[in-house]
Image: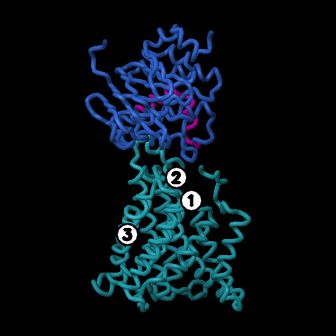
Chain colours: A cyan, B blue
Amino acid sequence: MSFTQFFQQLMNGFSLGSLYALLAIGYTLVYGILSLINFAHSDVFMLGTYFAFYMITIFMLPWWLSVVISVVLCAIVGMTIERVAYRPLRSAPRISALITAVGVSYFLENLGLVVLGARPKGFPRPDLMKNVYVIAGAKIQGVSFWVPIISIGILMVLLYIVYKTKVGMAMRAVAKDMETTRLMGVNVDQIILYTFALGSALAGAGGVMWAAKFPQINPLMGIFPGWKAFTAAVVGGIGNVVGAMIGGFIIGLAEILIAAFFPSLTGYKDAFVFGLLILFLIIKPNGIMGETLKEKV
Amino acid sequence: MNAEQPLLMIDNLHVYYGGIHALKGISLEVYKNKIVSLIGANGAGKSTTLRTISGLVRSRTGNIKLKDNLIGDLPAHRIVEMGIAMVPEGRKIFPNLTVMENLILGCYIRKDMVQIKKDMDWIFSIFPRLKERTWQKGGTLSGGEQQMLAVGRALMSRPQLLMMDEPSLGLAPLLVKEIFQIIKKINQEGTTILLIEQNARAALEISDFAYVMETGKINTSGEGKSLLFDEKVRKAYLGED
């Protein structure tokens, strides 16, 4: 493989990885706080693409505005899911919440099939994403160039929120000790709501960019990216925000580079990702950035 | 009796944990600027009493009144806004947050930045060791430092009433002494204190008033110093014959 080809694949991997990272954050934030795997997260990602799709095609809004509206709507959907499905189960056993999460996921997917239709829709890509840039002799697609840049910008904002604001501080506190956080005068339910809003907003942003990269959308499109982002969150150390980002890039790069270096194994790239998940669960279940967890009693 | 209105008044409080009747009609009063202690054996219901006041546990019947406000039905975060802060048992410092962040979380409900800055300086004047460790993670502090941080964190909400659950637990004897001196000092600077202690003697020595709890009920009460010489209390809780 020539250097330019490698560089192209690298950018491709980066852009895919940054999307996994955006999606993985939502899993890791919610898990960090509620010890709940929010299976519906990938469906919020799917809804994000549809929101943007309808804003662009029906309301004829400019692309950037559609993205913003889609992100806001995703945040609202995320908060609604938490309020309606998860909050009533706060003191229930963890397995009940987990099963509910699976239920919400199936509900959204099937609602999507009924309301949005099973037939895939072509997603209108903006020119920005269609352009081809030539960098150091390598032809880089607009998506591969802009998606990582935008994603990293969003991830920086997220890190700022989590580590530099009062709400972020409360999130980190809730993740460690919910009861003591309440003793600090923090409305924990509100913080959990914000957490869902934040995670879902990132899923929305990720969804729209995913659709710009793979411009065909359908109501079940969230499932595979969701599983891989979840894998990224586990590989990075579930509950850890920085870990989820690192995990996302690792999974994205691994997936693309496997296919690039071993073209005959392209069909196995998903198997490879999930093999990695199994490997991590066996060898380093706490992930790259994860601390040694004590089982909560 | 005191004609003044109590800061905190608890009337006939009943609390159930699952099927267990943990508090069987607790009534007590805390007057402003006093140190009041709850002493008693393990499982007597001292912690449950504080947890009920702070809103972490719901009572089945009974009233909790802060000045003129009934606060028994408020969620925990609203209780803090009403002016009751708690130093929880086992300190419960956020290990992943820095000392500074722990303190800022303590004044989460406040917006008056200028006064917050002053209070922070006040906390550092009481606990100079915290000032040296501002950017250290809470989890890296020693037990004594964590206890100081827990007290400082609770004080950052500028409470009218500060509740402390076993502040001397697990500390070296020298530190225990220091903690009790600090409690006294905080009280003298105008904070009312409701204290739970296993170390009954040290608690009674600094208390204006004390209640002795046994199996979910209040058994005896009286001025701190007088209980020190009470025959029953001495036998049961001070380990004397």
Amino acid carrying label 1: it is: Gly
Position in image of residue B148 (x %, y %): 54, 30
Q: Is residue B207 left or right of residue A77?
A: right
| Residue A51, label in figure | none
Q: Is residue A70 left or right of residue A155?
A: left
Name which of mark 2 and mark 1 comes first in the sequence. Answer: 2
In the displayed structure, would residue A173 be above or below residue A136? above
Instruction: Say which residue label 1 marks.
Output: A239
| Residue A77, label in figure | 3
Amino acid carrying label 2: it is: Ala
In the displayed structure, would residue A133 be above or below residue A169? below
Q: Secondary structure at mark 3?
A: helix
Closer-to-camera residue (B40/B90): B40
> In whole angstroms, how far apart are the C-alphas of marks 1 and 3?
22 Å
Instruction: Say which residue label 2 marks.
Output: A175
Residues packed near mark 3 inside 10 Å, few (<14), some (14 to 19) or many (20 plus): some
Q: Chain of mark 3?
A: A
Q: Residue at x 57, y 66 (%)?
A: A245
Residues packed near mark 2 inside 10 Å, few (<14), some (14 to 19) or many (20 plus): many
Same subunit, labels 1 and 3: the answer reads: yes
